[in-house]
Image: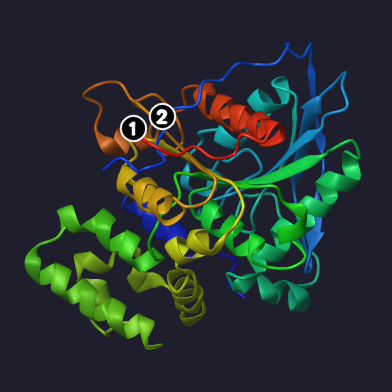
Amino acid sequence: MSASHPITALVVLLGAASACHREIADTPPPPVASTSCDPAPLTVHGVRFPGVLCRPASAAPELGVVLVPGTLYLDVDGNVPAFGVFPNTYRELAEQLAARGVAVLRHAKIGPQTGSEVLDPAAAARHAHFETRTEVTAAAIAALRAAVPSLRRVVLVGHSEGGVVALRAVAREPVAGGVAGVALLSTPSTGALDLLREQMRPLLSPDERAYFDNAVAGVRRGEGLPDDAASHPSMGALSFLSAADLGYLREVDAVDPVGLVARYPGPVLIVQGDRDTLVAPHHAAALARAHADRPTRRVELPGLQHFYKQVPEGLAPMAALGLTTPTSPEVAGAIAAWLRALGAGQTASRGT
């Protein structure tokens, strides 16, 4: 089994308002004096994933979040040590939410330098399939509820590809019955290969775009890449993927996020930075439109990139992706406000 999630390497190397668009003001509850963050590892199908549970230190929280990680070889803090990327977004987001009275469980993914450990190689082979990510999410929900019995409401907060995983998870039983809503942070509205094409399009000549499209059509049919793929710049890291990795990528690409969110009956929060160059803001708009007849809130945050760092004016997109400045508290504020609104019965946000 390859430990990689193939679209990971691709994204790293490449580096209309909805009818339910509304800004959510965060009116914080009384401040929490302190928070605590403790190890909370998960073991699923022969793999031990590092996990951390953050919560208010002096209170019995009623609101809980499982933070579903995105693509890349992500460690428990949302960093990618294998590629030298250290935004610390998941750690900072969890700490910010805990300070607002929310218990948050986050976990690493399988892959190099994530801290995950393969205990049973035969069982761990299941992690070569995208759908297994929903089983890891289900295990995280169960672990959070067991660790914090005071919880009355648990939601999934998925970042990037993690949003797609969250939507797949709540389509499954018994996960759906234990989740009060889904927050989609910078989540794509298209399949993985269409997203990759969108990211690459400005960099490619018309001939290379055509080559890429033909190669992708072959991958979707279950074929390998053309023999000369490595000589084409449009292929990038794709040309180095194994047959198993291409299979995983094919599974990710087959998932339709718009269809998933359209079928999900529960409340949805959509959060997007308007300086995100990996998942552009139009994806948030498409997801919001697909869920517009259900309880939906959408927040677009000015000046924030994919990992929710404030982007200085004039900074090049690739440089912006490498920012290690603090994660904007606006994201935690939006999530906390939405969670409190769910409890008050104010789940829908329609109109202009």
Q: Residue at x 77, y 51 (%)?
A: 141
Residue 31 occupies quadrant: top right
Q: Residue at x 33, y 48 (%)?
A: 15
Which color scheme is applied? rainbow
For label 1, the residue is: 320
Q: Secondary structure at mark 2?
A: loop
**Depth check, front residue: 270 or 110:** 270
Looking at this rendering, what residue extends furthest in the left direction?
206
Horizontal and vertical percent position of residue 170: 65, 60
**Depth check, front residue: 226 or 195:** 195
Q: Residues within 10 Å of mark 2 (few under 14, many from 20)?
A: some
Q: Residue at x 40, y 66 (%)?
A: 191
**Depth check, front residue: 175 or 49:** 175
For label 2, the residue is: 323
Left or right of 26 in this view: 105: right
Q: Residues within 10 Å of mark 1 (few under 14, many from 20)?
A: many
Q: Is residue 5 visible?
A: no
Left or right of 189 in this view: 98: right
Horizontal and vertical percent position of residue 102: 73, 30
Q: Is residue 278 above or below residue 166?
A: above
Is label 1 in contact with label 2 (beta carbons under 8 Å)?
yes
Spatial CA distance of label 1 from label 2 is 5 Å
**Quarter of the picture holding the N terminus:** bottom right
Horizontal and vertical percent position of residue 323: 41, 29
